[in-house]
Amino acid sequence: MAKQKKSPSWKRWIKLKYTQLMRAPGGAAFVALGFSIGMAIEMFTLPTYGLAFFLIFPLIYWLGGSLAGALIGFVVGKIIFIPVAFINNRVGGWVLPDHMKIHVPFGPDWFTEKLDHILLVNLKLIVGGIIDGIILGAIFYFPVKYCIQAVANRRKEKRKQRRVHLETSAARLPATE
């Protein structure tokens, strides 16, 4: 007996979610805003140990974006985070004053020196990540919006061509009495 090849259901699920996202009731701007929010939040989520992720939900509600778009933007932000983290650190260093020091007054000296350094680097990453995240969110908004609009327009054009084709082929059929 030959084994019957099973089609994975997750492929169908991903295609369904993609279709739902492309046909979102708010349109391309709704999804692109969610994507931008997710991208912006990801830029400073690592130095906050993942707690910044929870900012997505109130921002989506407040600004009226797509949660699915935000989660996709968050994942894309994770992919590009490592190279951007160096820029975040640099921008945070430019914004924060040079004389800024963090001092934790408990524990042995060797421990507090390392902890002070880690906290300062994380502060630079957070500040730089917020600034870079807002910039990246604004930059990614328009390409995502235009891509979604292009997909919607192509879909609309296909439906229009199909409707015209059906009308012309129906007009050619002989009338039956």
Image (cartoon, rainbow, N blue to C red):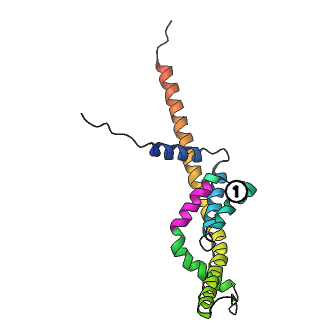
Q: Is residue 8 left or right of residue 25?
A: left
Whether residue 174 can be seen here: yes
Which amino acid does the dot numbered 1 rest on?
Ile
Q: Main secondary structure of the magenta part?
A: helix
Give the residue displayed 51% in from the left and 39% down from the top. Answer: 158
Q: Is residue 74 covered in magenta?
A: yes
Image quadrant in which you'd find residue 42: bottom right
- Per the image, the residue denoted by label 1 is 60
Where is residue 48 drawn, in percent x and y?
64, 72
Q: Based on the displayed image, in which of its 4 quarters is residue 147 positioned?
A: bottom right
Residue sitting at the far right? 62
Q: The magenta stretch spans which residues?
A: 69-79
Q: Can residue 145 be seen in this view?
A: no
Depth order, front residue of 165/111 = 111
- Residue 159, percent from left and from top: 54, 36
User: Relative to 109, does residue 129 appear above or below in the rendering?
Assistant: above
